[in-house]
Amino acid sequence: MKTPKDIAADLAVASLTSHTPIALSLAKLFKAAGFTLALVGGPVRDAILGRLGNDLDFTTNARPNESKKILLSWSQAVWEVGAEFGTIAAKHGETTVEVTTYRSEVYESDSRKPEVNFGETIEGDLFRRDFTVNAMALELTTDTPTFIDLFDGVTDLAKKIIRTPGKPEDSFSDDPLRMMRAARFMSQLEFTVDPSVVAAIKSMSDRISIISAERVRDELIKTLMSANPRLGLTLLVETGLAEKILPEIPKLRLEIDEHHHHKDVYEHTLTVLEQAMALEDRLGGPNLVIRLAALLHDIGKPKTRELIPGGGVSFHHHEVVGSRMTKERLRALRFDNHTISDVSQLVFLHLRFHGYGSGEWTDSAVRRYIRDAEHLLDHLHVLTRADCTTRNQRKAELLAKTYDSLEERIEVLKTQEELEKIRPDLDGIEIMAILQLKPSPIVGKAYQYLLDLRMEEGPLGAERATAELLKWWELNQPKI
């Protein structure tokens, strides 16, 4: 009778053979050269789960220069970006592979870069892996593929639990980023985390400070872009790790007392994130900008919180404060400028709809809403709708219906006026001729004034636009 490990091996081999037979051809080349080659880590786990993709990780006793020679004979698309860490990558057809020499890596107590040492055995390589479900291997250079599971990863996979091969304290000391990976795999696989791992993260959360902001950012993105980010974010908050990397989120857990009732802002935020994800089809699928905006949209509330005499609480201008805080946090995490700009603008605009009432906005106000959102209009639609988390069904339906009417008005105006293409009634050359100016920032201010007027009142015509420009110039010339 086959054991669970035998069954897991059969599943992995079957999945590997049916989806990526080229892996077996690569193994033959390594074997012919006198080296070992094993599929390792996430691909083995995914092969057992029946979800093997086109990115394969291998480990070998060949040194990087030897792996490179073999890969060049197998594929002309070879690169050495990770060579200093023992990794050579290649592409064959639709499949990308990374071949890494057996290794062990350890972070010194205050170093942001690991010290990498090459190992001699696959057993040593597997022991240094982050979690048991990622510490399984399928040796491909033996007579028949051999399944290696030294730390009972198959059992943990069946139980849907995240556990480290050795003591979690040792693992997280060697590489503190593994604490964030626990949250990421929790979200991606929808697994639970072993209590010993949770305890270790709580006691060692300070150690994440030695990891570069870029690596922290990348793990956060993977967690946020997973199928169930709530799971990983909850782990980050409950272990104290979020306080080190994204302190604005745990601060959303504001106190609630019997005299000043208000929503749990933290729980509200997670719900908004999930509701935004449910609407992502409007944005073409999973979208980092909308998920970041949903996560951060209320981070200005703790700083703007004021208790109202007699009961209640207010958060005046939290969208303005939150937008500034969003920029600061995303910059600290080394996000690109485009993402920072888009997310902070969505945070700034997320309350704008609440001035719409039951449809009192004029056409000019709707134009301004469109113009301020610019290329983020669809994102703003998603965020605004997701931000409704009331349990009052009647109120929720009314808000949705009201926003439906706003979107309908937007579409009508866009169709009638082609708002995305709107320009002032006078261009820059005409402005310079009328005001007798040379190219300068003043021309830009005049252009912006006419554009604002055009958005506010619709088409003006050249004659009226000229008159309005001269009035503006008369009022502002002494100040400019």
Image (cartoon, helix red, strand yellow):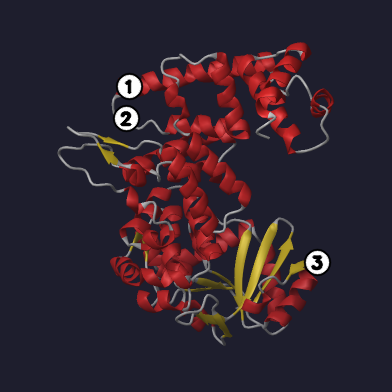
The residue under the point 73% across, 34% down is: 442
Q: Mark 1 vs mark 3: give the one in front.
A: 1
Q: Earlier in the sequence, mark 2 or mark 3?
A: 3
Q: Which residue occupies the foreground of this view, 11 or 85?
A: 85
**SS at badge 3:** loop
Q: Distance between the residues labelled 1 and 3?
A: 61 Å
Q: Which residue occupies the foreground of this view, 333 or 222?
A: 333
Disc 2 residue type (three-letter)? Thr
Q: Which residue occupies the foreground of this view, 118 or 33?
A: 118
**SS at badge 1:** helix
**SS at badge 2:** loop
| Residue identifier under label 3 | 76
- Which residue is farthest front? 478
Q: Locate the C terminus by quadrant.
A: top right
Q: How far apart are marks 2 and 3 (CA)?
A: 57 Å
**Do the residues under discs 2 and 3 have CB atoms within 8 angstroms?**
no
| Residue identifier under label 1 | 395
Q: Distance between the residues labelled 2 and 1?
A: 7 Å
Where is residue 255 shown, x and y percent of the image? 23, 47
Disc 1 residue type (three-letter)? Lys
**Do the residues under discs 2 and 1 have CB atoms within 8 angstroms?**
yes
| Rendered view: 168 above or below 282 | below
Direction from residue 246 to residue 480 in the image, left or right: right
Where is residue 278 shown, x and y percent of the image? 46, 36
Direction from residue 301 to residue 283 in the image, left or right: right
Where is residue 138 shown, x and y percent of the image? 54, 71
Disc 3 residue type (three-letter)? Gln
| Rendered view: 161 above or below 366 | below
| Residue identifier under label 2 | 390
Q: Which of marks 2 and 1 is nearer the N terminus?
A: 2
Q: Earlier in the sequence, mark 1 or mark 3?
A: 3
